[in-house]
Image (tube, rainbow, N blue to C red):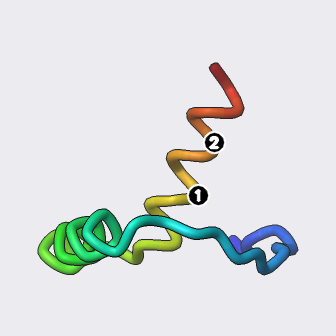
Amino acid sequence: MAKPPMVQKTYRVPQPLYERAMAKAEERQENLSDVIREALERYARD
């Protein structure tokens, strides 16, 4: 199934947060962009 069209945006996050999130995503063999999209979906839904 193809992903819907996406826009590319730039957001700022503290360096330590980014590094922890990236390490966790790598540990779980996940793509950090996918993790962020899932979090935004939950945020927008609630």
Q: Please report the residue visible at 87 percent of the width from the left and 74 percent of the height from the top.
A: 5
Residue lying furthest left in this view? 27
Q: Is residue 10 left or right of residue 30?
A: right
Dot 1: element: helix
Q: Is residue 30 left or right of residue 45?
A: left
Mark 2 touching mark 1, by CB under 8 A?
Answer: yes
Based on the displayed image, in which of its 4 quarters is residue 15 positioned?
A: bottom left
- Circle 1 residues within 10 Å: few <14, some 14–19, many ≥20: few
Amino acid type of disc 2? Answer: Glu
Q: Please report the residue visible at 57 percent of the width from the left and 34 percent of the height from the top.
A: 42
Q: Position of residue 44 (x, y in %)?
A: 70, 33
Q: Which residue is mark 2?
A: 41
Q: Position of residue 30 (x, y in %)?
A: 31, 73
Q: Which residue is mark 1?
A: 37
Q: Please report the residue visible at 52 percent of the width from the left and 72 percent of the height from the top.
A: 33
- The N terminus lies in quadrant: bottom right
- The C terminus lies in quadrant: top right
Q: Please report the residue visible at 70 percent of the width from the left and 76 percent of the height from the top.
A: 10
Dot 2: element: helix
Q: Please state which of residues 2 and 29 is positioned toward the viewer in this rendering.
A: 29
Q: Is residue 10 left or right of residue 24?
A: right
C-alpha span from label 2 to label 1: 6 Å
Amino acid type of disc 1? Answer: Arg
Based on the displayed image, in which of its 4 quarters is residue 24 positioned?
A: bottom left
